[in-house]
Amino acid sequence: MKRLIILLVFLTIAGTGFSQEMNKKVFDEKSNTDILIGYCNENGLMTGEFGNSYSQEFPNYHPDNDALNALKYKLDDITFVVVLGTWCGDSKEQVPRFIKLLYCLKYDLNRVTFIAVDRTKTAGEVPTADYKIEKVPTFIVKRNTREIGRIVETPEVSLEKDLIKIISQ
């Protein structure tokens, strides 16, 4: 009986505030449209105005095969945090391309944390201050939870070649 009570208390606490709403939308006055705020996933990114860009950029991006081969076996201990603005032109271009790259690598998207921010670079209830975001999108590359590099706004060469440079350091 005592175990049952403890389990019920735990489930009650876990259901009241430890989880963040996924794909939350807020109205952006400047663009006169809804934008995503906080944690999001590919399903959320495929909707609204951002979804229009996603449906064009994703299928039309073709990562370099040599770079894909160089990355293929170097991602076991790598995770990503992607901070983006669904209102942002660079995010509309680069985030779908990044997702396409990960699909080509057969990388588990559940290992990517997507955080959508508003124009002030805040994400509602999701804390982002530790990431020190100045521009979006920002692709943060982590090895075993420690940041090893980032791509900010647009890659220097290409997403895949910039990732090789970061991961190889």
Image (cartoon, helix red, strand yellow):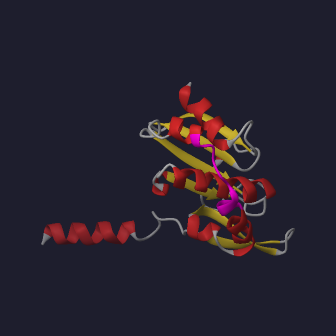
Examine the rendered structure and indicate whether residue 105 appears above or below residue 126. above
Residue 124, placed above or below residue 150 = below
Q: Position of residue 61 (x, y in %)?
A: 68, 55
Verify whether residue 59 appears in magenta.
Answer: yes
Question: Magenta includes 135?
Answer: no
Give the x, y percent position of residue 62.
65, 52
| Image quadrant assignment for residue 166 | top right
Q: Is residue 78 left or right of residue 43?
A: left
- Residue in the image at 87% along x and 68% along y: 30
Q: Which residue is drawn at 29% across and 69% down?
A: 9
Of 149 and 132, the residue lying toward us: 149
Q: Which residue is drawn at 23% across and 66% down?
A: 6
Image coords of residue 158 (percent x, y): 70, 41
The residue under the point 65% across, 61% down is 58
Residue 130 appears in the figure: no
Image quarter in which the N terminus is found: bottom left
Residue 87 pos. (x, y %)? 78, 63
Is the residue 119 above or below the residue 169 in the image? below
Residue 16 appears left or right of 141: left
What residue range appears in magenta?
57-65
